[in-house]
Amino acid sequence: MLFGRKKRVVERLLIVEDEPLIAFDNERFLGDEGYVVVGTLGCVADAVELIASGASIDLVVSDISLADGSGLDVARAARIAGLHVLFVTGDCPPEGAELAHGWLAKPYDQRRLAQAILVIDQIIQGEAPKRLPDGLTLFEREA
């Protein structure tokens, strides 16, 4: 197929968000966009456990401010497991730049979330994104 859509390498997502409405909306929307949501978890402990289990995950989409701790701990576990991370949070501390590909600032709409995930997909594939959605900050790190 000459003009077919490029294959994504990010297909399986872990959503870590403790605000139930945001978590539900993201899970539903991203599922509708063709992603497989491996899990939607609201606490650090559950996310770290799932990551450590070796579950097949391409990208962890995590808030930083979680009820039982910090999404930075989730990102540390993801890094150890060789997983990619996108933070979706109101404010990202400097340490976040060492653990994730980028940060999508809250509040965001679903379209910007999908665009941010596609940008991370491009980075993982070694491509330079042509355009960033509003609110997305990329961090300098290797894919």
Image: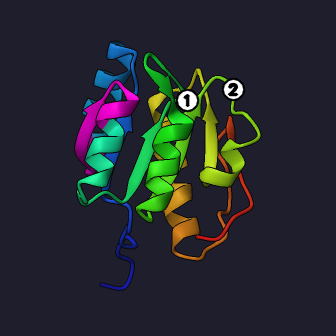
Q: How is the image coloured?
A: rainbow
- 77 or 3, nearer to the observer: 77
Q: Amino acid at mark 1?
A: Ile
Q: Residues within 10 Å of mark 1 (few under 14, many from 20)?
A: many
Image coordinates of residue 86 in percent, x first then y, are: 53, 46
Q: Is residue 24 visible?
A: yes
- 81 or 90, nearer to the observer: 81
Query: Which quarter of the figure has residue 16?
Result: top left
How far apart marks 2 and 1 lie (CA) works out to 8 Å
Q: Amino acid at mark 2?
A: Asp
The magenta stretch spans residue 7: no
Image disc number at residue 36: none
Local secondary structure at mark 2: loop
- 84 or 49, nearer to the observer: 49
Query: Which quarter of the figure has residue 101?
Result: bottom right
Magenta part of the protein: which range? 31-46
Q: Is residue 35 left or right of residue 101?
A: left
Query: Which quarter of the figure has residue 15?
Result: top left
Residue occupying image coordinates x 28% and y 43%: 49
Image coordinates of residue 85 in percent, x first then y, are: 50, 51
Check the picture and name the quadrant holding the C terminus.
Answer: bottom right
Residue occupying image coordinates x 40% and y 73%: 6
Residue bearing the label numbered 1: 64
Q: Residues within 10 Å of mark 2 (few under 14, many from 20)?
A: some
Q: Is residue 46 above or below residue 127?
A: above
Residue occupying image coordinates x 71% and y 43%: 95
Residue occupying image coordinates x 34% and y 32%: 45
Image coordinates of residue 91 in percent, x first then y, are: 69, 26
Q: Is residue 108 left or right of residue 1?
A: right
Residue bearing the label numbered 2: 91
